[in-house]
Image (tube, rainbow, N blue to C red):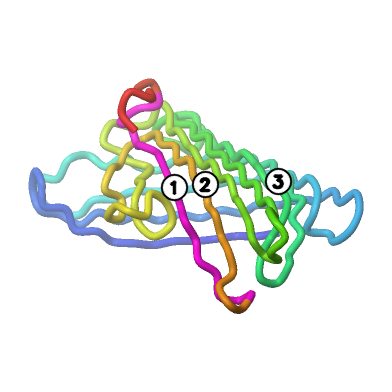
Amino acid sequence: ISFATGHSISPVDTPVSYDETFDSFSFVVTRTFSEKGPASQGWTFGAGPFWQNEKRDGPGVPPAYGEATALYLTGSYRDIRFRVYSEEGVAYGLNWQGARKGLVSDYNYSALNGYFSRYLAVGETPHQNVNFLVDFGGYFDGPDGITTYGVGGSSNLRAYDANFIEGNAYYVLATEYVRPIGWPWLRAAAILEAGNAFARPQDISGSRI
């Protein structure tokens, strides 16, 4: 059982100056069906409500998006062997959430996010790995002006500034080669990443990477 709550205030300068407030709350129950080994391995499924609300304070501000109460569903599989200084195995999953206008919601939306990770030990050197990573997401049918995803920064497309491209759909593909240098706890990594973000899921293409 897990829950999370958030509250943030962001200043906006255009078209007029105002403060934008975001509040959120989620409550999720998950169950892992472990076939063998630790309880953290195997299939995991979960569900719960996710609530968010946006408010705007100030004279002449545009109308706020309001609140949305969504159903959140998650499913994942994990078979990862932790080697202290490296990992080996596979993990993948999908998360979906959706809200319908009129059901404790001021607007419709749905979002789908997924990931795939494969960690391979290669060669005779202990803790030498080649890893393959995929991350993607799409936000559908929400209000105009909402931007859900950004790529760039310390976790994806690491050669670029944080969130240098934003949109309501994205993908990132990565390959990593990691090798110990002198000690198993000191490893060098060569990383090749490719990806992009798009204004809408319908705009996803491979023409610009």
Residue 161 forms part of the magenta stretch: no
Residue 186 forms part of the magenta stretch: yes
- Which structural element holds mark 1? strand
Figure quadrant of residue 83: bottom right
- Whole-angstrom CA distance, mark 2 to mark 1, is 5 Å
Q: Which residue is drawn at 40% across and 40% down?
A: 194
- Whole-angstrom CA distance, mark 3 to mark 1, is 33 Å
Q: Residue at x 55, y 37 (%)?
A: 97
Please provide the residue range marked out in magenta.
184-201
Q: Which residue is drawn at 66% across and 43% down?
A: 92
Rendered location of residue 184, percent (x, y): 64, 75
Q: Residue at x 60, y 50 (%)?
A: 131
Label 2 packing within 10 angstroms: few (<14), some (14-19), many (20+): some
Residue projecting furthest to the front: 124
- Whole-angstrom CA distance, mark 3 to mark 2, is 29 Å
For marks 3 and 1, the one nearer the N-term is 3
Q: Quadrant of the N terminus?
A: bottom right
**Can residue 58 be seen by looking at this rendering?**
no
Which residue is disc 3 drawn over? 46
Of the residues tagged 3 and 1, which is closer to the observer?
1
Residue 140's disc number: none
Number of numbered discs on residues: 3
- Looking at the image, is 207 positioned above or below residue 168? above
Which residue is disc 1 drawn over? 192
For marks 2 and 1, the one nearer the N-term is 2
* Magenta part, dominant SS: strand
- Between residues 175 and 167, which one lies in front from this camera angle? 175
Rendered location of residue 66, percent (x, y): 35, 42
